[in-house]
Every structure is written in C-alpha cells, then in structure tokens.
Amino acid sequence: MTAPEELVPVPAVEPGTAGPPCGYARLRAEQPVVKAQLPNGETGWLLSRYEDVRAAFADPRLVRPLLSAWPPREGPDAPPPCLPTFLEMTGEHHERVRRTVLPLFGRRRLEFMVPRIRAVAEELIDAMVASAEDRTADLVAAYVDPLPLRVLCETTGLPHEDRDIYLPHTLTLLGAAGLSMDEVLAALYALQDYAEDLISRKEKEDGGADGDADYIQLLLAESRRPGSELARDDVVSFVVTMLMAGYKTNIQHTGNALFTLLTHPEQLRELRAAPQRMGTAVEELLRYVPLMNAINILVAQEDFTLHGQHIRAGDAVIPVPASANRDPAAFTDPDRLDLTRTPNAHVAFGHGPHACTGGNLTRMQLATTIEVLLERLPGIELAVPAESVPWDESTPLRAPAVLPVRW
C-alpha cells in the first residue's frame, strides 16, 4: 500500500473560476498517474494526461462502481444496492440497454427538439426583457437556470411540476464526493423511489401516438414488447440517469460557457457574425469549460501497471477530463479559447462504451441557447467587471452564481 505521506490532494479549483485547476499541468508533466486523497477520505489514482484519460474510459479492466457500493462496505451493515445508472451498467446488460436507448439520442432523432428548445429559450428571453429595469438582468436566474430542466422534461417526459421532489436529491448527489455514504445512499434511494413511482404513473397513462410519446413512454412500450432487450427496471434507471447527468451539469456548463463568451467579446462578435460556425464553437466550449473535475470513479478489476505505477485490483482510478482537455500533447495552445478550433477530439463526454448518452442533446441545447441569446440581444455584454462576478462553489461543478448583463 502507498504510504500516506506519498498521497497528493486532488488539485483544487482556483476561487472564482470553473477550473481546470492549474495543479494538473504539473501532474501531467511530472506525475501522470498519482495516488491522491479524495474529498471523502478515500484514495484513488488520478490520471491527468489526455491519452491516458481517453484510454481509461474505454478500458474493460476499469469499471464504474455503483454509487451505492463505493467505497465498498461489507458485513451486516452493507447497504442494499441501488439499480445501476447507465454509466454503471456493465457487460451484456449495458450492451442490451445501449442498443435500445442510444438511437433515441442520435442527432437526427433529436431534431424534433430544436424548435422546442428554441421556443423555451425565446419565452425565457422575452420574460427577462419584459421584467428588466434599465435593460439589465441576471442571466443565470432568468435564462441559464430554468432552461435545462425545461428541456430535459420536454425530451424525456419528466414532470416539471415534480421538480421540488426530485431536484433536492439530484443536487445532493452532485456533491457526493464530499458526502458520507449514508447521505449519498439516502439521496439515491429517494431518487430511485421517485423514478419507480413515476414509471407506475406512466404505465397507467395512455402513451398516445408514437410521435407524441415522450421518451419514458417509448421505453416503457419497448420494455413490454415480447422479446424486448429492455426491462422495466432499465426504464427506472433511465429516469435516474437523466436526472443525475442531464440537469445541474447542463446548468453549470451553460453558465460557464456564456460567461466565457462574454469575457471574450471579440470572439463573441465573430461568432455572432458567422452563426454557421456554432457547431464548432460549441465543441470548443465543451473542451474549454470543464464539465467535471475528478469525479469519475472507476475501479480496477485486475492488477496492471501504468507509467511505472502498479495499480491493484480494487483500486479506484480517476480519469480527469478537465485536465485531459487542456493537455498540450493533444491540443495546440490548450489554455486559449479558439471557437474555430478543428479538429477537437475532447473528452468532455467521456469515451468508449460509456460515453455520455445525452451528449448530442447537450450540444443541441447549448447551440440553441447561444443562438437565441445572440439573435434577441445582439449587444449583450457583462454589466459588471468579470472579476466581481460571484461564483457558486458548493459542488465540484463550479459556475457563476449570478451573471449580470446589459443589452
């Protein structure tokens, strides 16, 4: 076992930024695989280089554990396991579910959402402008915060009116790295109970015509089809997965992306003048703005050696996309925002079989969010100095707490 004095702390994000922490530059250069002390007291091997991070996500020797089973607890007080989310499914089970669910999140299949996202975005901008004094407003409260949940509900069929039930548990789980196992389990069980109840309600509803059915209804119908590869429990897991991965992360990333654009006014003007480049710009924002810092826990299933470090079966391995996406070995001038950067093979959504199912929906949402904002408010700018913007630093997903703008 590695001696305690050899442990390094997980690099901390500088206050007032989204990251990635500057400390990763040194780790990439000097200690690309290093044993680190995690916020919850556990230890794990941090991977900071792009090549290693990308490979780890696709490595069958590394498996994402159930949140309810890591850190492992044995004996009579061991908690009952939760259903796996899509990120935690393994082997043949994961392949079955992925074959059924992944097509729903392809670019073409999601095109029906573009006018819906645009309608919600336009409605929120209109309300913000109507209630604004002196053509100023907080972009987070008026636009960034409500939009992702509305989009998620429109796509999947989650009831927006239930948000006071499921959002507190979702937000608790986002801070899981710093919480006790009991707190994590309580939130997980509550979220799974909510999903079970929602599925029961959906089963009693008329799903409507196929074109009108939401994704939960479509998956439920598929699970009832004779010979289907999808079970009812998989639909429950779908609801939990979308709540954990599709809500707060999108709020935080959207707020960071808009802050980044507003603090790079020249590039913002160029994007406004060439909206056909929006897809390329979105990929750069996904690379430049970290979606997550050191919260991807994988567990080694066998012993192996990486960069001279002996990783044993049962060890936690933590690939850090926020570091990988700033690796100069993979990206030219990686700390510079370049909205025209191509190619851009970032790992914001992971890589391999467990790459984020909702990646295309996130891309579409971010592109439409920016497009509508620039169309409706072409002169938008920060209303305060960038350094005075307060930040929400309560979770690993740092973001501006408010974003005062004028137009």
Image (cartoon, rainbow, N blue to C red):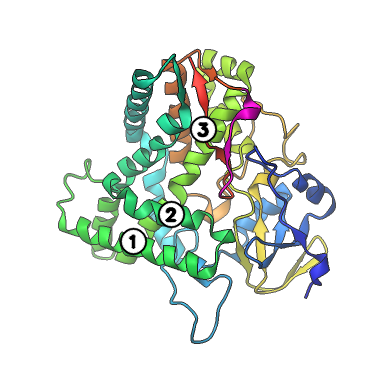
Identify the residue shown where x is 34% and y is 61%: 236
Q: Which residue is mark 3?
A: 402
Badge 2 element: helix
Q: Which residue is mark 1?
A: 236
Q: Which mark is residue 170?
A: 2
- Report crowding for label 2: few under 14, some 14 to 19, many 20 or more residues within 10 A (C-alpha): many
Q: Is residue 244 left or right of residue 9?
A: left
Q: Residue at x 63, y 26 (%)?
A: 386
Q: Crowdedness of circle 3 by 10 Å Cα count: few (<14), some, many (20+)?
A: some
- Which one is closest to the eye, mark 2 or mark 1? 2
x and y, in percent, of residue 407 in the image: 48, 14
Q: Residues within 10 Å of mark 1 (few under 14, many from 20)?
A: many
In three-dimensional space, the C-alpha distance between marks 2 and 3, rounded to whole angstroms, equals 21 Å
Mark toward the start of the polypeptide (1 vs 3): 1
Decide if residue 73 is on the left or right side of residue 159.
Answer: right
Residue 256, given in percent of the width and then of the height, sits at: 56, 34
Instruction: Determine the secondary structure under disc 3.
Output: loop
Residue at the image position 61 percent from the left and 45 percent from the top = 347
Q: Name the residue type under label 2.
A: Thr
Q: Amino acid at mark 3?
A: Val
The part of the image, by quadrant, that contains residue 332 is: top right
Amino acid type assigned to the residue bearing label 1 in the image: Val
Q: How many marks?
A: 3
Give the image location of residue 183, x and y in percent: 48, 66
